[in-house]
Image (cartoon, rainbow, N blue to C red):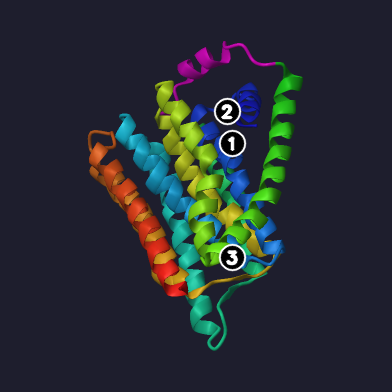
Amino acid sequence: MIDGVVDLARRTGLPKIVIGATVVSLGTTLPEAFVSVMAAYMGNPGLALGNGVGSIIADTGLIFGLTCLLATVPVNRYILNRTGWVQVGAASLLVLIALGALLTQAGSEPVLGRWVGLLFLTLLAGYLYSTYLWARRSGETDHRGEEAASSETYMNLGLAWLMVVGGLLLIVLAARLLVPSAAEIAYRIGVPDDVIAATLVAFGTSLPELTTAIAAVRKGHPEITVGNIVGADVLNVLFVIGASAAATPLAVPDNFYHFHFPAMLVVLFSLRLFISLDRDRVFKRWQGAWLLGVYIVYVALQYTLNITTVH
C-alpha cells in the first residue's frame, strides 16, 4: 500500500518532505486507526486509547531511537520546527483534555466524548493542509532532486491503485483479527487490555513505521524516517484517537494519568530538546540510545507493575 501511495504522490509532484510527513505517515498510521476504531466499536476503549498512545511511544522511542543508533540522521529544521511543534502540541492537548475530564467528571471514570474526536479530526484536516502549504512555501526543498526523482520510471497506474486498495483491504482484515486476539491474550495471562494495547498491539501496528525506517536507512535516506515518525505521532493523536473518540466515547483508565501519558510526554519532549540542542544538524547516537532506553524501561515497568498488581 505504501509503495502504491508514494508512486501516486510522486505523480502529483508533491515534494518528498510532504510525502514523508503526510502521505507515508497516513499509510503507516492506518493500522493504528483501524485497530483503535474497531476496538472502540467492540467495547474495548482501553485498547483504542492505549494503541494510539502506545504507538507514539513505540514510534518515537523504539523506531526513531533505533534509527539514530544505526545511521546519521539529519535534523531538518524546517519540518521539525513546524510539524515537530504540532507533534508535541497535539499530544499535550490530549493530556490536557484528559486531565480536564478527570477534574470535571468527578465520581466517575473520565471519558473523552465524541466532541473530542470531532475536534481532533478538524485539527487533522487543518494540519494536513498546513503541512502542504509549508512545504510549497519552503525554500529548502531541492527541486533539482525532485526533478531527478520525477525522471524515475513509474509503476503502471493500475498496479499502483491495486497496491493501494489491496494493501488497505489487508490492513482492515489484519485489524479485524488483531483486536479480538489481543483481547484474548490479555484475558488469559491476566494483563489489562490497555497494557496489551500500549505494548503488543502498539508495536504490531507500528511495524509499518519500522519497515519504512529500515528501508530508508538501507537506501541512505534516513531523513525520510524523521518526517514519517513525526507525522505519524501527530496522526496517532488527531487521526487514530480522534476517529476512535468520534466513533464512541473513550474512557480513560487511571494508569494513563500516572504512567502512559507521562511516558509519552517524556519521549516527545526529549525529542523536542534534542532538536534544539543539535546545532550541527544531526541527531547523536546517544540521543537515540536515550529514546530507546525510555521505551525499554516503559515496557518493562508496565508488564512488571501490571502483572504484579493483577496477581
| Badge 3 element | helix
The residue sitting at 28% across, 34% down in the picture is 281
Is residue 136 toward the left or the right of residue 165 in the image?
left
Discs 1/2, front: 1
Residue 195 vs 267, above or below: the answer is: below
Q: Residues within 10 Å of mark 3 (few under 14, many from 20)?
A: few
Discs 3/1, front: 3
| Mark found first going from the N terminus, 3 or 1 | 1
Q: What residue range appears in magenta?
A: 137-155
| Tags 3 and 1 touching, CB below 8 Å | no
Q: In x, y percent, where is residue 90? A: 48, 57
Viewer-closest of 51 and 3: 51
Q: Residues within 10 Å of mark 1 (few under 14, many from 20)?
A: many
Q: In x, y percent, where is residue 270? A: 31, 52
- According to the picture, the residue beneath numbered tag 1 turns out to be 23
| Badge 2 element | loop
Residue 304 vs 269, above or below: the answer is: below
Is residue 142 found inside the magenta-colored segment of the image? yes
- According to the picture, the residue beneath numbered tag 2 turns out to be 14
Q: CA distance from mark 1 to mark 2?
A: 10 Å
| Mark found first going from the N terminus, 1 or 2 | 2
Discs 3/2, front: 3
The residue sitting at 58% across, 63% down in the picture is 188
The residue sitting at 55% across, 52% down in the picture is 201
Q: CA distance from mark 3 to mark 1?
A: 36 Å
- According to the picture, the residue beneath numbered tag 3 turns out to be 187
